[in-house]
Image (cartoon, rainbow, N blue to C red):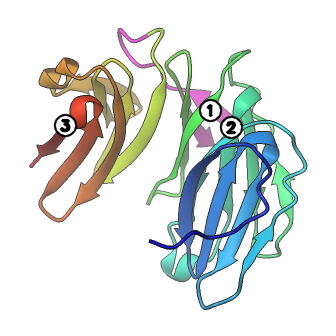
Amino acid sequence: WSEERVDAGSGVLRAAAIAGAMLHVVGDDGTWLEKDLVGNGWRRVDAGVGVRLNAVAPPRTDGGAGDVVVAGAGCTVLRRGVDGVVRPEAVAACPAGVELFAARQLATGELLLGGSQATVLRSAAAGYVVEPLPGAASVTVRAFAERGSSTYALADDGKLFRRVGTAWVPVAAELTLAPLLAGVEDGSDGLFVVGGAGLIWRLP
């Protein structure tokens, strides 16, 4: 390991994602950093906000072309296009007081946002719509993943949901043994979920 020296202040850096040849890192106080993976150093992106940023969603197109989406506290959603300009996006459907912790651009072109109060929001032609999680009113949505034609949402208290149409259904009840699920990602031999107590689950 080698330490990368960046001017990120004293706040926590909370998420990272690669879009094409660019690494994006976001965190507290509106911090947004980027690094060109072909050899250039770190640069600060002017996010135009001072809130905590928790999630980065790279574009799904080949080569990483398209908008990078960042989400965070206060229902904040920012889009940065190929022109380099950061544009705030209004999310009128986001409930008051929600903090967003997850963002994923789907192969369909839709954007999913997840956060506190069991919030899941999906982009649509007329803005964003809420997609409720059944029986999970108080959990926080931490991550999304896709496997084949299925989309999954991972939340606190060991809850994993699969999207069927525009509805979410709970799956894998055995994951309730975990106090916290922190990440989910598709792999060549299954859907992997990681969480508390050093545990890893695989859904073939």
* Secondary-structure class at tag 2: strand
Residue 185 location (% of width, % of height): 31, 52
Residues marked 2 and 3 touching at CB (< 8 Å)? no
Q: Residue at x 81, y 41 (%)?
A: 29
Question: Considering only order in the chain, which callout, 3 or 1, is on the residue closer to the N terminus?
Answer: 1
Q: In the displayed structure, would residue 176 be above or below residue 27? A: above
Q: Find disc 3 in the rendering and name its residue.
A: 199
Q: Find disc 1 in the rendering and name its residue.
A: 100
Residues marked 2 and 1 touching at CB (< 8 Å)? yes
On the question of residue 96 being in view, the answer is: yes
Q: Is residue 185 left or right of residue 13?
A: left
Q: Residue at x 53, y 57 (%)?
A: 109
Residue 74 location (% of width, % of height): 76, 27
Q: Which residues are magenta?
A: 122-136
Q: Residue at x 70, y 87 (%)?
A: 40
Q: Please state which of residues 15 and 148 is positioned toward the viewer in this rendering.
A: 15
Q: Residue at x 29, y 19 (%)?
A: 179
Q: CA distance from mark 2 to mark 1?
A: 5 Å
- Mark 2 or 3, closer to the camera: 3
* Residue lying furthest front: 2
Q: Is residue 117 magenta?
A: no
**Disc 2: CA contacts within 10 A as few (<14), some (14-19) or many (>=20):** many
Residue 53 location (% of width, % of height): 69, 42
Q: Find disc 2 in the rendering and name its residue.
A: 72
Q: CA distance from mark 1 to mark 3?
A: 25 Å
Question: Considering only order in the chain, which callout, 1 or 2, is on the residue closer to the N terminus?
Answer: 2
Q: Is residue 124 magenta?
A: yes
Image quadrant in which you'd find residue 98: top right
* Secondary-structure class at tag 1: strand
